[in-house]
Structure formats: C-alpha cells, structure tokens
Image (cartoon, helix red, strand yellow):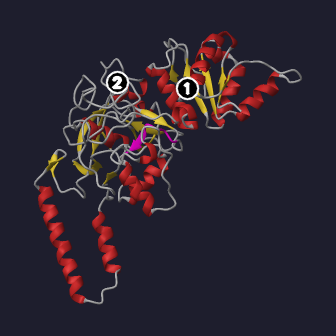
C-alpha cells in the first residue's frame, strides 16, 4: 500500500516524478508510475491504488484540467476527504475544485526545502501524519525569547462561577467555616476587580473575567484588503465597512497546551490530539495547542464559558484600531515581528514570544492559524454593502469549509496580513492550526 497516490496528465510526467521523488526522500511511499502488471487492466490497477492510498495528490496543469481521467481520480480523493490539490502551472482548476486551497508549485525547482514544498508536506501531514523517517527525528530545542511563566494548568474563563457552584454544593457541617470561605472569596473578587480596573485593557479600561483575556470595545473598521495591496486574494475584496456593535472579551493568546490539557482532564469524552514532532508528548505547555478540529475548539471555548470569535471580530481585534495596515503593527514585517517560515523556531513558539498589538493581543499574525466561527465563502465579501457598515456579520449560513485567520509558522508573510483569509475542512487536524476564544454577546 502506498501512502500517496499522484494523479497527473501524461504530459506532466517529469513534474510528477520530481514531486514523487522528493516525497519519497521525506519518507512516504508514493504511487505515480503507470506500470501495469501482466493480467491486469489499467483501470483495475488505478482503482486498487486509489483504494489503498491515504492521500491523493492531483497536479493541475493546462493539460490535466481538461483530462476526464485526472478529474475522475481527483473527485474520488475529494469524496474520501484525502485530496491535496497542487498547481504546477498558472491555471484555474476545474469546476468543483476551485474553492479548495491548492499548494502552489508553479515555480518550484525541485528543492525539497523550498517554502512551497514544505507547505505541501504540511498539507499531507495534516491527513496522514509525518512519515516515520521524519517523525522519528529529534528536533533541536527552540531558542528564543522567554515567555511569561505558564501555570501547570491554565484556568478556564470565569472560574469563579464554577468555584461558587462547587462551594454551594459542598457539605458544610461547620457554619463558621462557610462564612470564612465566603469572606475570603468576596475579598479576592473585590481586590481582583479593583486591580484589573486599574490596568488599560484593549482600547478601554475594563475589568476582564481573567487576566488572559482582553476587553475589545465596540467600533467600526474597514474589513478586507486595501485596493493597493498587491498580495491580496480575491476573497479579501472588496474592502467594506463593518460595525462591531457590542464589546467582547478575546483571549490574549491562542489556547495553550496547558489549558487544553485541563479541558481534556475535565471532559473525558475528549482526548489530546496526536502530538507534532516539534512538541513531543505535548511537553511544551506554553505553546499553542494544534491539531484540534473546529468542533473540538468550539467545545473547549464553551467549556471555558465562551465561544469562537467571528471572523469580523477577529480582524477588528487584530487591527487594534489601525485600519489600512498590512499587518497588525504596520506595513513591513521581519522575523522579529512574528513566527513565520523565515523564523527560528522550526515549529510553534511559546505564546507571548513576540510583541502584542496595540490592544494587548499576542500572535494575531503567525505562530498558528486560528479557527473562527464563520463558514468560508470566497465570494462572501462581494455580498457586503459598501455605502454603510454591516452590523456584526457572521458569515454565510452554511458551506463546507471553516475560516482560518492569522497565518502560521509554516507560511510566508503574505498569509500573515490582517486581511488574509484561510480555510480548511472543519474535521481536519492540522499541525499549524490552533484557536483562541471570545466571550460576550
């Protein structure tokens, strides 16, 4: 059985061979050569290999987009949820495949270390894990900025509600003991509220439910890419006015491994996802949790007393009151701003390793992609009015992909722009996708 089946047009055989060889050198088994054993038909062999493959790669070119055979093979991979499209020429994929993100190898020169090829490998690993050869390698310890200490178990949002409920249910044979607990609890809440109210949080002074959350006040902003942004995708246009009508809380960082471990400990129906090679056994507790499905991220936020942010809330908060900029901090980017493919980490980095935006939010660009609440539609922005703000948009009613925001350690800088829109299947586990929670409204 081969790990990967490559579908391609006969004219593209040299490119298919180069991609296959690079994937085989990484440790995967690849079926791409059309050698038909005696006694079997071409269709029999193709079907057998498709049935056995754990990942189907389709190479889109000017020839393959018109090939019924290639389209049929790609459709089978798509139906099974194991298709990874790859562009090897500047063409538009066939109908039915245009909404799917495709790895771009149009300019690839057979360098297995090139960013585009690394992105393809990560797409494959999201489906079938890293090969034993790669997964067994020992990653060097990441060196860099020291983050703030993270407790062994991060507390969920608004834990005082849970504490009060547990205290009221507890047996109390001694009346005086309960009074002592009540006084201690009241004093702690008053002091915490006073101290928090003295700190500027978000764009106003407010009292957050936890120090790990930032208050975002209501306001208006221009959502989407500016007309002069040459790196913008079509799904980021047109730029349109949006109004966030009510304030909300947003996690200051992506959810960490430590926090997710506590969730799993209290919700036995959930398990820790497979640990990536750059965080073996989930030993780096202050790194973002990854490989969590959209539904698991939603369940965590609800357990913590919140929800996933909408796409509009996420971009509003990421911009931090600075409309028109490419990134949350400005129009230029260096490895000192965020964790992306040119950075030093070889994987995720501890949260708070880079400066926050103006509203105190960390990792709004880079480190990990973040699930948001909305379904993805590449034409959704085209339905938005331009003359007046839309109040609290929540995306299309239903689609097949969920929106991702922020870019990751495995992407080039254009994916870290505040307007960039990613998307993926909500049931997938991706080694560079995490999330953060919101609360309010």
Is residue 247 visible in the rendered image? The answer is no
Residue at image location 45% in from the left, 58% down from the top = 264
Quickly name the residue at label 2: 342
Looking at the image, residue 219 sits to the left or right of residue 288; the answer is left
Residue at 16 percent of width and 62 percent of height: 192
Location of residue 391 by image quarter: top left
Q: Nearer the viewer, mark 1 or mark 2?
A: 1
Q: Which residue is mark 1?
A: 26
Q: Which residues are magenta?
A: 429-435
Q: Residues within 10 Å of mark 1 (few under 14, many from 20)?
A: some
For the residue labelled by badge 2, is the local secondary structure a helix, a strand or a loop? loop
Q: Is residue 253 above or below residue 411?
A: below
* Residue 336 horizontal/vertical position (percent): 24, 28
- Mark 1, secondary structure of its residue: helix
- Would you say residue 410 sits in the magenta stretch? no
Vertical side of 160 occupied by 144: above or below: above
Q: Quadrant of the C terminus?
A: bottom left
The residue positioned 43% from the left and 39% from the top of the image is 433
For the residue pair 350 and 99, the one nearer the viewer reads as: 350
Which residue is most to the left? 198
């Amino acid at each position: 059985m081969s790990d990967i089946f490559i579908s391609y047009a006969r004219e593209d055989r040299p490119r298919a061979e180069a991609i296959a060889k690079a994937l085989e050198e990484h440790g995967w088994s690849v079926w791409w050569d059309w050698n038909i054993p005696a006694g079997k038909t071409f269709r029999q062999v193709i079907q057998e290999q498709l049935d056995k493959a754990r990942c189907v790669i389709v190479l889109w070119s000017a020839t393959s987009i018109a090939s019924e055979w290639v389209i049929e093979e790609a459709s089978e991979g798509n139906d099974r949820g194991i298709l990874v499209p790859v562009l090897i020429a500047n063409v538009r994929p066939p109908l039915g495949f245009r909404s799917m993100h495709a790895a771009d190898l149009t300019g690839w020169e057979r360098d297995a270390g090139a960013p585009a090829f690394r992105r393809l490998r990560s797409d494959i690993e999201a489906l079938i894990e890293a090969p034993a050869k790669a997964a067994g390698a020992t990653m060097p310890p990441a060196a860099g900025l020291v983050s703030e200490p993270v407790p062994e178990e991060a507390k969920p949002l608004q834990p005082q509600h849970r504490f009060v409920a547990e205290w009221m249910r507890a047996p109390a044979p001694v009346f005086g003991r309960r009074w002592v607990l009540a006084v201690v609890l009241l004093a702690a809440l008053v002091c915490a509220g006073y101290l928090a109210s003295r700190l500027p949080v978000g764009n106003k002074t407010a009292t957050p439910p936890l120090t790990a959350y930032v208050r975002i006040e209501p306001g208006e902003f221009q959502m989407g890419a500016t007309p002069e942004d040459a790196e913008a995708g079509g799904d980021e246009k047109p730029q349109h006015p949006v109004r966030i009508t009510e304030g909300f809380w947003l996690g200051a960082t992506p959810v960490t491994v430590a926090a997710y471990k506590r969730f799993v400990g209290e919700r036995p129906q959930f398990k820790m996802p497979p640990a990536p090679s750059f965080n073996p056994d989930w030993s780096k507790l202050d790194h973002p949790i990854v490989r969590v499905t959209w539904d698991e991220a939603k369940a965590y936020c609800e357990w913590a007393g919140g929800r996933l942010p909408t796409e509009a809330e996420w971009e509003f908060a990421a911009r931090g009151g600075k409309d028109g900029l490419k990134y949350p901090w400005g129009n230029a980017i260096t490895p000192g701003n965020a964790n992306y493919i040119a950075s030093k980490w070889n994987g995720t980095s501890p949260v708070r390793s880079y400066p926050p935006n103006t509203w105190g939010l960390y990792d709004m660009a880079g480190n990990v992609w973040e699930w948001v609440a909305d379904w993805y539609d590449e034409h959704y922005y085209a339905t938005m009015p331009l003359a007046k703000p839309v109040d609290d948009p929540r995306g299309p009613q239903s689609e097949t992909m969920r929106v991702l925001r922020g870019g990751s350690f495995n992407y080039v800088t254009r994916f870290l722009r505040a307007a960039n829109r990613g998307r993926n299947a909500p049931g997938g586990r991706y080694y560079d996708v995490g999330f953060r929670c919101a609360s309010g409204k």
